[in-house]
Amino acid sequence: MLTYSFVDLGSDSLYEHLYKCIKNDIMGGNLKAGDRLPSKRTFAKNLDISTITVENAYAQLMAEGYIFSVPKKGYFVSQVKTLEEKKTKDKKKRELSVKEAECFADFVSNQTKSMNFPFSIWAKLTREVLSGESETLLLPPPSGGIMELRKAIADHLYQFRGMDVSPDQIIIGAGTEYLYGLLIQLFGTKVSYAVEDPGYKKIGQIYESHGVKVCHIPMDASGVLPDVLEESKADILHLSPSHHYPTGIVTPISRRYELLGWASKSEGRYIIEDDYDSEFRLLGRPIPALQSIDVMDKVIYMNTFSKSLSSTIRISYMILPVKLLKKFYERLGFYSCTVSNFEQYTLARFISEGYFEKHINRMRNYYRNQRDRLLECVKKSALAPHIHIKEENSGLHFLMEIDTYLTDEELERRAWAQGVKISCLSRYYQNPEQAVKHAVVLNYSGIDVDKMQRAMEVLGQCVDKTKEID
């Protein structure tokens, strides 16, 4: 017979207390589905309470689905998800999360390590901004961003990228995704956008989510194919000519002029140049931006500090052609800048006082060492006779072609099962039939050096059927 204490009721009535006691026993698994509850009269006599109290408690439990009644037989516990079942489910979820967290080498993401962020310098500049810019920190910034930061960016681009732009042309925003949205509003939803295939899928998804038409343009070894681009009837071309993701292709000068020629054929055509990690070319000088050779004012240049500083610093910028500036401010000038004054002033000082240049030089050396160490581990692994490395000098990732009979999906699955996250090039194609198979995209910026050799050994074990590349 169920027995409960009615000594400490608190603010509950008798029936509420009994209802909660029975409910807790059901949810805790002490009362299981199908168990028969005592009759109202017997239960009331055992607990020394009235039958009406038991009846009200049972009625509330029935209303909420914890128990049900069978005529002439009594009350029974319903099939509900008990606390024990919930604990088991939660435990499985935790075990799954732990298993996922056991990944020791992640070649998919490209996160910045905390040890590489210049915390001490950033803290120093932050204090200076708080004391020196106290009168302007709380003033509404211009729609395009504070002028100090725009001037600092313009000076940096002139000195290190050979780009001669006015600070007025620079628009600051919280991430490139936000800036893409502004451009879609600027041009309207009737224009169509061309993106690279293969390419970073999120770009196409952003455009499609805004309801605009997206054309996926195939590529050759030099970049997007101009003839296919022309046939697509696209108005805006989005590309990353200095370091394509994920192939690593650097668009040669001849193809760049072809694409600029395509843009010049119509007043409404423009090229969005995504220069996301141009600072980290590891061999020779950075590739000149497409914008720097554009004499027709057809290139919208975009860059971000998420790669060079930290993925959590959501500060990006775009440089609009002069003839688009008036249109931008007429249509979108009502928008407030989405980056706080506090961050803008701090970053402006970081650039103008030379810290950004020093940071880039230091990180370029760091990433070169990362790349060299990873290539050394590849050469020492069982993979060495069966792989071919491509585009290892152009940025923070490269391709590793593997000669194997495994499908890309099976290769990824085997690696992930042993704690190595990889993604194959075929994932980035819109048309799977055109996808290049057996090429792994290796983002190496966030990999610990002491785990690289083990990761390559794991990949060697995953590729169980190989033949040497001719």
Image: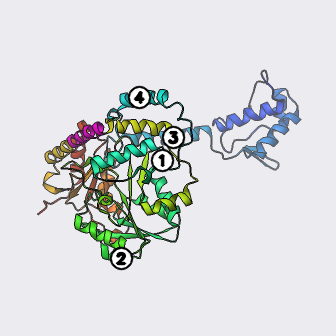
Between marks 3 and 2 in the image, the one whose residue lies nearer the viewer: 3
From the top left corner, tell me how far across and down residue 298 is, in percent: 38, 65
Structural crowding at the residue carrying mark 3, measured as other residues with C-alpha within 10 Å and reported as few (<14), some (14–19) or many (≥20): some
Q: Which residue is mark 3?
A: 340
Cβ–Cβ under 8 Å for marks 2 and 4: no
| Quadrant containing the C terminus in the rendered view | bottom left
Between marks 1 and 3 in the image, the one whose residue lies nearer the viewer: 3
Dot 3 or dot 2, earlier in sequence:
2
Amino acid type of the residue that numbered disc 3 sits on in the rendered structure: Ser
In the image shown, does 265 or 359 lie closer to the viewer? 265
From the top left corner, tell me how far across and down residue 292 is, in percent: 30, 58
Structural crowding at the residue carrying mark 1, measured as other residues with C-alpha within 10 Å and reported as few (<14), some (14–19) or many (≥20): some
Amino acid type of the residue that numbered disc 1 sits on in the rendered structure: Ala
Residue located 14% across and 51% down the image: 384
Viewed as shown, does residue 392 lie left or right of 138? left
Viewed as shown, does residue 27 lie left or right of 393? right
* SS label for mark 4: helix
Cβ–Cβ under 8 Å for marks 3 and 4: no
Dot 1 or dot 3, earlier in sequence:
1
- CA distance separating discs 2 and 4: 50 Å
* SS label for mark 1: loop
Amino acid type of the residue that numbered disc 4 sits on in the rendered structure: Ala
Viewed as shown, does residue 28 lie left or right of 120? right
Q: Which residues are magenta?
A: 357-370
Q: Which residue is mark 2?
A: 230
- CA distance separating discs 4 and 1: 21 Å
Residue located 71% across and 37% down the image: 23
In the image shown, does 391 or 419 lie closer to the viewer? 391
- CA distance separating discs 3 and 4: 16 Å
From the top left corner, tell me how far across and down residue 323 is, in percent: 44, 63
Q: Which residue is mark 1?
A: 174
